[in-house]
């Protein structure tokens, strides 16, 4: 990539040097920045309008009419202040996730009768000095995101104040050069995004293939010519003639949860959880994110471990979510040291007639997922109860056949998982390159424009 002929200090540490002909300014001098007070609540006399919400910005780097599906209510005066127009940038102003600090979307077409909601800023650029698409790319500069993170307020919810945003520096080439930079980045990012999309589709197909293999083997086995029979369970259908279907209670050695350790008051008194300790305090989010005894996990001391004696985890147990998103199932790994189960999940220890790895594959299959979700009779937050789990149906092949099935599925799923991991690494590299390219171009580290 080309460089500019000469550079000068920007005077801003996170920007560094800029091309000699570029200038530095503050956001407030080049833009109008507005925060909203509109939500989805309806009040007498208020008018109904389409509304851009926080999640719309997180999910959509470019906002079209089709992205906006919710409504908010406001007075006519509020509508005039908070309505949006083509070219406006909508920016997240606070978040519980550091990765979403000052995420931005640009409105790429006129949105009639549309406003923006809480937790967002609207930024309107002075069009004679600043191309709004250039500013959009500038907000995708990694160094700027790090600057916001370092200077933001709060601990649990991290916020970027209006004062901080207004006094943030930006670099300004001439308006003609901004147009050229936008054209270059539009073309390059579109190519990169297409490559990313292709690889994401490949990952989707690989995951579908993985599920299909599991579905086939846990319900029909490895012999395609085996004689079948009706399982007696509508959503399970036919199974090999020599297999059994039964209630889970007949193959359970133990079904327990965090609450079985004692009353609320005794748990509060005896359970001490911290960021460090001798015993891993296992949460489902740890397993979901493959956080095995690392710095993101929670820990407790030996006294707490001994108090939580009914939920000690040794390896090979199944863990099933009891509240929230029903259907999450994990096989607890071996050799994890002293571990005990945290709230909101069940621990299942099985009799020797059922291999826990086989039952794990059963539960993550489509039939297993249906089995668990049919147990949820709640109307709001999903909930599973012990008696319902015990009475649920499972498939039980002979133990030697379970082992062969597990061995087969471990090999096949690992092959697919390795391919998925490889494609994901390629996606991550493309995203890193995309962000690096944007950062280098909008701060003038590389030149993509002509002098004409």
Image (tube, rainbow, N blue to C red):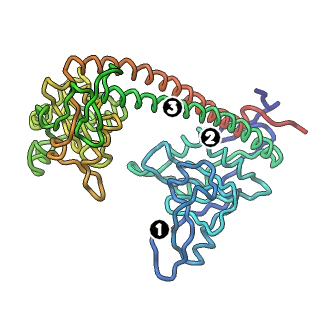
Residue behind mark 1: 40
Q: Which residue is mark 2?
A: 141
x then y, percent, for residue 441: 71, 36
* Label annotation for residue 205: 3
Disc 2 crowd, CA 10 A, few/some/many (<14, 14-19, 20+): many
Please report the residue visible at 62 percent of the width from the left and 67 percent of the height from the top: 83
Q: Mark 3: which secondary structure?
A: helix
Tell me if 433 is positioned left or right of 386 in this view. Answer: right
In this rendering, position of residue 401 left or right of residue 189 = left
Q: Is residue 269 above or below residue 307?
A: below
* Front residue (pair 273, 410): 410
- When the figure is inspected, residue 195 is found, relative to residue 138, above or below; the finding is above
Q: How much space separates mark 2 and mark 3, taking CA atoms?
A: 32 Å
Q: Secondary structure at mark 1?
A: loop
Label 2 secondary element: loop
* Quadrant in which the C terminus is drawn: top right
Q: Quadrant of residue 416?
A: top left
Sequence-wise first label, 3 or 1? 1
Q: Which mark is residue 96?
A: none
Whether residue 29 is visible: no
Residue at the (50%, 62%) spot, across then down: 118
**Badge 3 vs badge 1, beta-carbon distance below 8 Å:** no
Q: CA distance from mark 3 to mark 1?
A: 38 Å
| First in residue order: circle 1 vs circle 2 | 1
Q: Position of residue 108 (x, y in %)?
A: 68, 54
Q: Earlier in the sequence, mark 2 or mark 3?
A: 2
426 or 13: which is nearer to us? 426
232 relative to 402, above or below: below
Residue 141, image x and y in percent? 62, 40
């Amino acid at each position: 990539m080309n460089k500019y002929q000469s550079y000068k200090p920007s005077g801003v540490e996170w920007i560094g040097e800029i091309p000699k002909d570029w200038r530095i300014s503050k956001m407030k001098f080049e833009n109008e920045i507005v925060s909203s007070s509109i939500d989805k609540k309806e009040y007498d006399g208020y008018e109904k309008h389409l509304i851009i919400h926080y999640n719309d910005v997180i999910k959509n780097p470019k906002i079209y009419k089709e992205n906006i599906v919710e409504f908010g209510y406001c007075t006519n005066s509020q509508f005039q202040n908070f309505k949006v127009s083509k070219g406006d940038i909508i920016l997240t102003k606070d978040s519980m996730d550091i990765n979403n600090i000052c995420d931005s979307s640009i409105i790429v077409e006129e949105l009639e009768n549309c406003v923006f909601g809480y937790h967002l800023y609207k930024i309107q650029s002075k069009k004679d000095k600043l191309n709004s698409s250039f500013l959009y790319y500038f907000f995708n500069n990694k160094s700027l995101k790090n600057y916001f993170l370092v200077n933001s307020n709060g601990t649990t919810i991290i916020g970027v104040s209006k004062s901080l945003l207004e006094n943030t520096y930006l670099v300004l080439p001439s308006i003609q050069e901004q147009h050229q930079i936008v054209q270059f980045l539009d073309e390059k990012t579109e190519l990169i995004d297409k490559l990313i999309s292709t690889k994401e589709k490949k990952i989707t197909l690989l995951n579908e293939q993985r599920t299909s293999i599991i579905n086939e083997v846990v319900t029909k086995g490895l012999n395609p010519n085996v004689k079948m029979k009706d399982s007696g369970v509508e959503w399970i259908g036919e199974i090999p003639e020599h297999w059994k279907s039964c209630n889970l209670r007949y193959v359970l050695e133990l079904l327990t949860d965090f609450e079985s350790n004692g009353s609320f008051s005794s748990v509060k008194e005896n359970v001490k959880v911290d960021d460090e300790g001798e015993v891993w305090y296992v949460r489902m989010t740890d397993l979901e994110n493959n956080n095995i005894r690392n710095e993101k996990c929670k820990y407790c001391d030996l006294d707490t471990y001994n108090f939580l004696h009914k939920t000690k985890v040794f390896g090979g147990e199944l863990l099933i979510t009891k509240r929230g998103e029903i259907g999450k199932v994990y096989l607890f790994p071996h050799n994890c040291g002293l571990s005990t189960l945290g709230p909101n999940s069940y621990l299942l220890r099985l009799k020797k007639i059922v291999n826990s790895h086989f039952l794990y594959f059963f539960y993550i299959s489509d039939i297993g997922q249906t089995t668990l979700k049919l147990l949820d009779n709640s109307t709001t937050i999903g909930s599973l109860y012990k008696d319902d789990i015990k009475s649920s149906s499972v498939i039980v092949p002979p133990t030697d056949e379970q082992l062969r099935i597990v061995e087969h599925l471990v090999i096949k799923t690992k092959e697919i998982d390795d391919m998925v991991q490889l494609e994901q690494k390629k996606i991550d590299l493309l995203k890193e390159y995309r962000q690096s390219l944007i950062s280098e171009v909008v701060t003038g580290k590389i030149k993509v424009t002509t002098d004409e």
